[in-house]
Image (cartoon, rainbow, N blue to C red):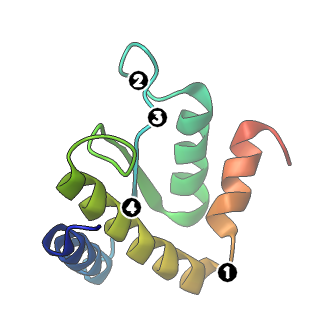
Amino acid sequence: MANSNAAQAGHAQAEADIAAGLLRYIHCHPDAHGQPAAWVREYHRLLREELGVEGLVSFECPYSGTRSRKDFAAEYNRRMKTEIERRFGPDTEAKLAQRAWGHE
C-alpha cells in the first residue's frame, strides 16, 4: 500500500516544480560505479535538448529505497508525465527512451 503522505508530497513537489517552470523526472539506473547507464545519459540528453526536461538520477526512486521514498518518486513522476504528455503529446518521453536505446 502506498504511503499517502509521501505520495501527496511527491505530487505537491511536482506541482510546485511545474508552477516554477521546471519539468523533471526522477530516474534510478546507476551502473556498478554509481553512474547512470549509457542509454540513460542519452535519454537525459534527449529529454533536456528536445523537451527541456531535466532527468534526475537518484537512488531514492520507485525501484529502491524506503517505501515512502518510492511513493514520493512514483507520484512525482506520474504528475510530471501527465504534464509532459499534455505539453508534447502522448508517449513523447517513451519515444525518446526508445531512441536512446537505439530503436528508432
So how many labels did they put on this image? Answer: 4
Q: CA distance from mark 1 to mark 3?
A: 25 Å
- Identify residue for label 3: 29
User: Which amino acid type corresponds to the residue marked 3 in the rendered image?
Assistant: His
Instruction: Tell me, yes or no, whether the two marked residues, 2 and 3, touch with CB atoms within 8 Å.
Output: no
Residue pictured at 29% horizontal, 67% vertical: 1
Quadrant assignment, res 38: top right
Secondary structure under the numbered disc 1 in the rendered image: loop
Q: CA distance from mark 3 to mark 4?
A: 15 Å
Q: CA distance from mark 4 to mark 2?
A: 18 Å
Residue pictured at 32% horizontal, 76% vertical: 21
Name the N-terminal-most of marks 3 and 4: 4
Q: CA distance from mark 2 to mark 1?
A: 30 Å
- Identify residue for label 4: 24
Residue pictured at 86% horizontal, 48% vertical: 104
Q: Give the answer, above or below, for where 12 lies relative to 45.
A: below
Q: What percent of the width, then of the height, locates residue 102?
A: 80, 38
Q: Nearer the viewer, mark 1 or mark 3?
A: 3
Q: Nearer the viewer, mark 3 or mark 4?
A: 3
